[in-house]
Every structure is written in C-alpha cells, then in structure tokens.
Amino acid sequence: MAEPAADLVGPGCAAYAKKVPSGSGSVQGMAKDPVATAASNNPLLKTLVAAVSGKVNRQVNLADTLNGAEFTVFAPVDSAFAKLPKATVKSLSTPKGAATLRSVLTYHVVPGQIAPDSIDGRHKTVQGGTLQVTGSGDNLKVNGSASVICGGVQTANATVYLIDSVLMPKM
C-alpha cells in the first residue's frame, strides 16, 4: 500500500496534519478504516458524521452504505455546516427533512475512488446529480464555489476531499 499522505492536494493539508498528527483521525489513521468509520475519528468532520450516522435525522443512516463500497467523498468540514442557515439545519432533522438530508448527503458521494490527478471534470453522484471539479493541486474547486481544503485522503474504501462548503443539489 502506498504512503497515505503521498498524493494529498490542497492548501490545508499541512494544517490538518498539524491539528491531527497521529491516531485514528490522522491521514495515516484514516487509511486503515472504511470511510464512515474513518470520518468518525476525524475531529474536523463531527457534523458530517452526525448527519450520515442518523444522529441528525434517525431516518437517514448511511454509515453502513458508505462503508460497503468504493467511493469518492467530498466531505464538508464542520465550519462548512456552520455557514448554513440555522433554520435549514433544523428542518433537516424533521421527518419531512429526511429526503432532503439524504439527497444533500448522497450528492457529496461519487461511486468509485478518484485520485487527485484524475479528479478534474464532471462526476455523477450517488444522488443522481453531477459535480464539476475544476483546477489541480492546491487550487481545486467543486461546483465553482467549494474549495478543497485537503484532498486525496485515503480510507480503506474511499478517497476523501475535505471541502469548505456544503454542496446543494438541484431539487
């Protein structure tokens, strides 16, 4: 297996490595677990983990699904969720909000693992929509607005790109 940090891209990788230098939430630690488990160990992804594990809405638990196949995951960090209007976040926890939450979460997931040197382009998501990734290296954008903080983070079954915004599918 290649060194987990070998193909990292993004201006925030050094800060991430400094914040989480070792342990199960580090780049090396995340490489050992499937993606939902790995994310649960990452202190930058607490809100995302709550959303995919049924803690935001009991009707939406995608952890086993995410751990069960190969994916590329655009993972909004906690500060990305903090930018959302509080009313929007509250609505996602209601029974009526379950379908919207599932749609938003699966819009961040692309089937198969895509390495940083192949990520530029259009990608069909599990939700059914399409993401547009542009740029390379430390200048990757998703849908023209979300910046990749640190990408190419490997887990046992996924390639993760930490992003600074929550992506919203067309509803």
Image (spheres, rainbow, N blue to C red):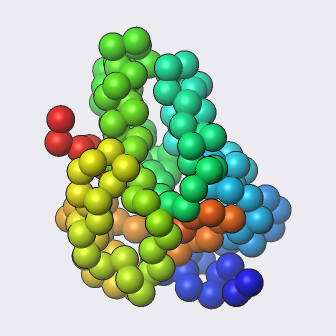
- Residue 51, given in percent of the width and then of the height, sits at 51, 34
Does residue 86 appear in this view?
A: no
- Residue 146, given in percent of the width and then of the height, sits at 31, 60
Seen in the picture, residue 115 relative to 104 is either above or below; the reply is below
Q: Quadrant of the C terminus?
A: top left
Task: Name the one closer to the observer, 149 or 157.
Answer: 157
- Residue 18, given in percent of the width and then of the height, sits at 68, 71
Residue at the front extreme of this rendering: 69
Does residue 128 appear in this view?
A: yes
Residue 98, image quadrant: top left
- Residue drawn at point x = 30 percent, y = 79 percent: 120
Residue at the top extreme of this rendering: 95
What is the count of numbered marks?
A: 0
Q: Quadrant of the N terminus?
A: bottom right
Task: Name the one closer to the observer, 26 or 132.
Answer: 132
Tell me: 122 left or right of 137. Answer: left
- Residue drawn at point x = 82 percent, y = 62 percent: 23
Task: Name the one closer to the observer, 36 or 144.
Answer: 36
Residue 94, image quadrant: top left
Seen in the picture, residue 2 relative to 34 is either above or below; the reply is below
Residue at the left extreme of this rendering: 170
- Residue drawn at point x = 39 percent, y = 44 percent: 106
